[in-house]
Amino acid sequence: MAFSKAGLDMKVFDTAVIGLGPTGATLANLLAMQGLSVLILEREAQIYDLPRAVHFDDEIMRVFQNIGIADELLPMVRVNPGMRFVDKENNLLLDWPRPQDITSQGWNASYRLHQPDLERLLRKKLEGYDLVTLKTSTRATSIDQTETEAVIRTQTGSTNRSETYRARYVIGCDGANSQTRTMIKSEIDDYGFQERWLVIDLILKKDRPDLGDHSIQFCRPDRPMTYCRGPGNRRRWEITLLDTEDENRVTKPDHIWSLLKPWITSDEALLERKAVYTFKSQVARNWRHGRIFLAGDAAHVTPPFLGQGMCMGIRDAFNLAWKLASVINKDAEHPLLDSYEDERNPHARAYVEMAIKIGQIIRSINHNDALNDVSGHRTRSGEMRSITPKLGPSSLTAPRSNSNTDIEGRPATQFRVQPSDDLMDDVSGYRHVIISNTRPEGIKDSIFWVNASEQEEAAKLLMDLDAEAAWIRPDRYLGAATKSIQELYEYLPNFLKNREKCGDFNETSFS
Ligand SMILES: Cc1cc2nc3c(=O)[nH]c(=O)nc-3n(C[C@H](O)[C@H](O)[C@H](O)COP(=O)(O)OP(=O)(O)OC[C@H]3O[C@@H](n4cnc5c(N)ncnc54)[C@H](O)[C@@H]3O)c2cc1C
């Protein structure tokens, strides 16, 4: 990874990523993996170190696997057994157990993490790419775009030195108060949830197995709270603040220990970090303006009750990265980029809406009404199920008569390839995959073919899909599952078919 050099402002980067939180760091890795030059502009000098994400899921671990950090991350995380919702008398209202075996994604369903550990690993991985230029302590202050590029102005360091950079595409991963979002004048849909919570991270000085490994939602209308078991000896409490409570007073250690007294004392744990957040539920209406995109918290913020805010940003990055590479390398044409917002925006909304419903259970006076609201997400025995929304319809996912519309637009199963027993993504690499019994004709050499007649697990996947052929995209979502390889060929977008590169298509024809 190269650091600031004089004369950089003359270069046109393929991509510029504004903000190096988990979304920006994931995206920058995925872009660099595809051979694109990436300029990263990050306002802060160091990784943000206030209490934030403690959970991610199997789909997200698969993204980390594709980036190449899963093996290093694994010892730092903890498999999560689930979440329990209890009332004031500690009676169980709702159980949300998470499967303990390996899921269809090839990983565990749910992990507990310490967000800075993840961010450090993502940054370390970026250091291995010569094509990545990181400018820390550098704030993007404006972005203009022409027909061929975007121009970003920045201010660096305590002197506010101004610099100018050029990139073909800019992705604003600059968090909840995104200036990029303001610059592209995207309006925000506010779902109305807004609550102040005090978030406390402790490090146990001695073992406290009685606290348990499950997350607990204390559903008390007067003061809802959450307990989370983190990796190692980390423990988290999240506590609602009353309107009358003053932020400066509640964050004083004495006050924090008085709130935690029913569970733990200062003799047993160190107060590591604390912060007051206003949890909001907002989704930007437009995620793209020409060459400028939004991803992560810049595009959506959610109350954290599902543990999905960061996960949503990482899904954005996985969805967008291959599309940007396809267009920059002139394999695909510009309209492919429209599919990013079309697919991701409704998907993110599904998580925000569900998180609000969970918030209502935690705060409700009449628990039954709130529990009824999630009845569609419960098993017959009454346990809660994780939601698995489909990508929104796009030029890539639009249903066609021959395709199986219910399964497309969801994460594809990851199986083990024999005889090595390696996970499929490790064998295929970061690219499109076709699974079929006969070799597909007329597709690009860069597409990885899995011969289902030689791979039992691949054959089983086709059987489960009730299909003869399947297309898995680089973001590992199922693009299509069809009754024959010919039908699949018809379904495939043109940019995956073996024809001359697009040539000089009109890059300015944004829709
Ligand atoms: C209490 C709490 C608990 C949470 N729990 C979970 C959880 O369990 N699971 C989960 O998935 N999510 C969780 N989240 C949400 C998660 O932390 C966020 O969604 C995630 O950090 C967003 O990542 P991001 O990269 O999009 O934005 P950020 O992490 O906010 O990063 C944005 C970056 O952009 C930089 N920046 C901003 N403006 C500029 C500029 N003009 N120029 C240059 N740089 C700029 C910032 O310095 C920052 O580094 C939780 C959040 C909170 C507050």
Image (tube, rainbow, N blue to C red):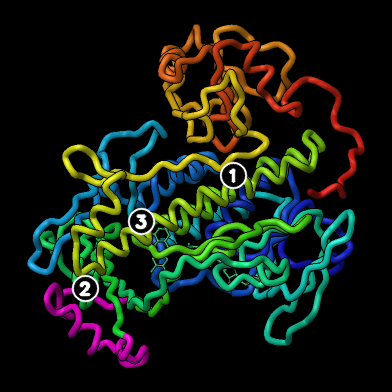
Residue 57 to residue 236: above or below: above
Q: CA distance from mark 1 to mark 2?
A: 36 Å
Residue at 78% in and 48% down: 511
Q: Amino acid at mark 2?
A: Pro
User: For the residue labelled by badge 1, is the local secondary structure a helix, a strand or a loop?
Assistant: helix
Answer with mark 1 or mark 2, whichever residue precedes in sequence.
Answer: 2
Residue at 80% in and 79% down: 162
- Quarter of the view holding residue 388: top left
Q: Magenta residues?
A: 243-272
Q: CA distance from mark 3 to mark 1?
A: 21 Å
Q: Is residue 168 left or right of residue 237?
A: right
Q: Amino acid at mark 1?
A: Glu
User: For the residue labelled by badge 3, is the local secondary structure a helix, a strand or a loop?
Assistant: helix
Mark carried by residue 306: 3
Q: Horizontal and vertical percent for residue 267?
A: 15, 79
Classify mark 3: residues with Cα within 10 Å, few (<14), some (14-19) or many (20+): some
Q: Nearer the viewer, mark 2 or mark 3?
A: 2
Q: CA distance from mark 2 to mark 3?
A: 19 Å
Classify mark 1: residues with Cα within 10 Å, few (<14), some (14-19) or many (20+): many
Please say whether residue 276 is visible from this viewpoint.
yes
Question: Quarter of the image containing the N terminus?
Answer: bottom right
Task: Give the residue number, with chain letter if any, for mark 2.
Answer: 221
- Label 3 CB-ligand 1 distance < 8 A: yes
Q: Amino acid at mark 3?
A: Leu
Task: Give the residue number, with chain letter if any, for mark 1.
Answer: 343
Q: Horizontal and vertical percent for residue 263?
A: 13, 72
